[in-house]
Amino acid sequence: MNATFHDIKGASVFITGGGNGIGAALTDGFIAQGAKVAFVGRSDATAFANEMADKHGTRPLFIQCDITDTSALQAAIDQAVAAHGPLRALVNNAANDMRYDASEVDEATWDSQQAVNLKAYFFACQKAAEVMGANGSIINYSSITYMMGASGMVPYVTANAGIMGMTRALAREWGPKGIRVNAIAPGWVFTEKQETKWATPESKAAFLQKQCLQAFIQPQDMVGGTLFLASTASAMMTGQTMVIDAGVVGTG
């Protein structure tokens, strides 16, 4: 059971990739707090929006959108504000962690990976800062892969390192406006995509041994930390990275 963050009730929240995986858990978690949630996704998430309406009695606003289309992404944020009021929180969650041998990455692959994993994050932040109300909070999802120097996914790892630099720079630039910018770096979260595409019994067992806590991380394990960063409970926290990885990496 998550803690209740009373100041999130009625808040306007925008989530990228909010219809599946970690994003779906976040949409569910914010609605449970009474937030007004809008989310974008490339695939049709109408069924998920219906599920949320049945569960909570409140329907999230789903806007189908490819986040690499900057105009469409920023227009979606405008649409969310028109429906729900000035933005309180942006959660940049959508990502694509494709695997590539570094020697085989071509220019088109590199550019497409940066477009979804880094460029879209910046332009969502840019628009969010324009339409945010008081106590605005931007939460960028990164990954511990850049701290570990994970192999086989260099474009993704590079983008996640970039997210951290961007987070710190925007926190400094927008602090005078009262906008906080933080990041979350998850460990290996076992979404349906991970279980289907990448996870094997052997790889899961090996990764579990790197964790202090001996349990596989689930999407719902990301909800509490995200709510905290969106809430005024973290009012003086900005430019920081919250690692939620069951103890794989150390910070500080």
Image (cartoon, grey):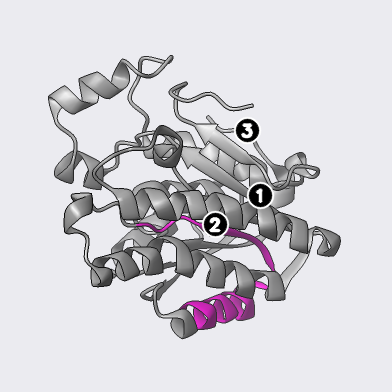
The location of residue 34, given as percent across then percent down, is 61, 52
- Say which of 36 and 226 sits in front: 226
Q: Is residue 201 left or right of residue 62?
A: left
Report if residue 166 is visible in the image: yes
Q: Residue 230 carries which label?
A: 1
Q: In this view, does 116 lie above or below 147?
A: below
Q: Which residue carries the number 2 mark?
A: 91
What residue is at 22 percent from the left and 66 percent from the top? Answer: 106
Q: Is residue 187 left or right of residue 241?
A: left
Amino acid type at image mark 1: Ala
For the record, the magenta segment spans 73-95
The local secondary structure at tag 3 comes to loop
* Label pair 3/2, CB-CB below 8 angstroms: no
Spatial CA span between label 1 and label 3: 13 Å
What residue is at 59 percent from the left and 81 percent from the top? Answer: 78
Q: In this view, does 25 lie above or below 155?
A: above
In the image, residue 84 lies in the stretch drawn in magenta: yes
The location of residue 195, given as percent across then percent down, is 20, 39
